[in-house]
Image: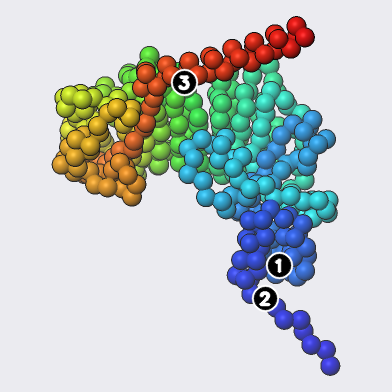
Amino acid sequence: MTTNAPSVPNHLIREIMHAIQHRGNGDAMGCLAISSKEALSVFKYVIGHDVIGDLGSQTEADRIKNPRFRSTLAKDTDNDDEIKMFRMSPIEFNMKALYTIATRNLRKLRVQLNRISDLPKLNLENNITELTVTGCIHHDEPSLIPILDSWKSLQSFKVEDLTNNSIDQVRSVVLQSKNLLRLDFEIESDQLENLLTTVPAFPFPEIVTLRCHFDDDHVPISFAHAQTFPCVKQLHFQCNPEIPPTFEFFQMLRNIVQCFPSLNVAKLDFNSLHTFSHEQNGNNQITDWHEWLNNAAFAVPVEINSCTGIKFTHNDNIDPLYAYLKSVGFTDNGKSYHLIMEKKFPNVKLIHRITPNYVLSPFDQGIIHMFYSAYYDEDVIGEEWMNEE
């Protein structure tokens, strides 16, 4: 009489697979996958949903497997996507057969162009649904479109390090990708203006994220001749103006939102820095802009998430400032000198956070400079003495 081998429920196989994934042992994941039909199904799901393939140039393929696998399970709150990527735990495969099975089931891919166009072709069972392209795309390089030739189900497209010359290429990719749902741009302020004002209007999909880098010379932008994009249902706009927000800055945000008349909701994130002042009037600008939201006249519901970093030195007594902030509605937010306020205005929901940003005083900077100068001078003197010997 034969007995059937006991079967393990899929949710337990997934827990085992995740535990192995945290250790980065791809071979162990693959061996578990080929042990049963159920385990193989879980393996394909995990590779497709919890893993990113990091695809580099052909020259890298001589030294490491290309693409490399990185787990998305590790929690990382860093805002820098480049840092996030390389903090993800690598998943190593030493057995070629298991590596091939994993590669065929990738659904998320990050392509590093780095001015190199000889990217390897991938043999995939499924279409890539989430694609991130990073690295400079120059006008003398081949189009991005060949990278996407076989991926007709692309749903999410993210572009970093965008150059002015590559906006037209991204436009072509968006037009070609009929199933595209999400588009994420990392752009400079002049590129944002170009993107929103160029005729014909850019073919944005339903969900759009715009991450914009401003410098002092480009805040704000009027967008007097901006286009409208009625196909967009969700907008997430992120920027770091560094300087405290002004009324003109909020006019710019309002004008950006008005470019998307069909929005269900607009999410606006911005961070700024405030230098601590011993005069109370100098600190009022931390919250003065709250009242401007009463007159911002946003046409659609808006969620604003703002963080203000308070710059101070060890000589500054910031306790009175924090007492004032608590008196106007801020509350403690878990860590020392971290505050939060949630407030509602007409058509606006505001979450405003305060964080400490310790900086060195000019005196401290001078001491450190003297230390390093003396240290390196000793090294130079020592090297000269050795050479004389």
Q: Which element type, helix, strand or loop, lies under badge 3?
A: helix
CA neighbours of label 1 inside 10 A, class few (<14), some (14 to 19), many (20+): many
Residue under label 2, please give it: 8
- Between the C-alphas of marks 3 and 2, the distance is 61 Å
Tell me the quarter of the image containing the C terminus. Answer: top right
Specify the quadrant of the image occupied by residue 2: bottom right
User: According to the image, what is the colour scheme of the structure?
Assistant: rainbow
Q: Residue furthest bottom?
A: 1
User: Is disc 1 in contact with disc 2, using a CB cutoff of under 8 Å?
Assistant: yes
Name the residue: 83% across, 53% down. 95
From the top left corner, tell me how far across and down residue 210 is, in percent: 45, 32
Determine which residue is flagged by label 3: 368
Amino acid type, mark 3: Ile
Task: Please give the count of numbered marks on the rendered protein.
Answer: 3
Numbered circle sitting on residue 39: 1
The amino acid type, in three-letter code, at marker 2 is Val
Label 3: how many Cα within 10 Å (few below 14, some 14–19, many 20+): few
Which residue is found at the position 49% from the left and 40% from the top?
78
Q: Nearer the viewer, residue 92 or 292?
A: 92
Quarter of the image with the N terminus is bottom right
Distance between mark 1 and mark 3 Cα atoms: 58 Å
In the depicted view, which residue is nearer to us: 300 or 317?
Answer: 317
Residue that extends furthest to the top in the rendered view of this protein: 388
Contact between marks 1 and 3 (CB within 8 A): the answer is no
Amino acid at pointer 1: Ala
Q: Viewer-proximal residue, 359 or 139? A: 359
Q: Residues within 10 Å of mark 2 (few under 14, many from 20)?
A: few
* Residue 250 occupies quadrant: top left
Residue 156 appears in view: yes
> Residue lying furthest front in this view?
389
Q: Nearer the viewer, mark 1 or mark 3?
A: 3
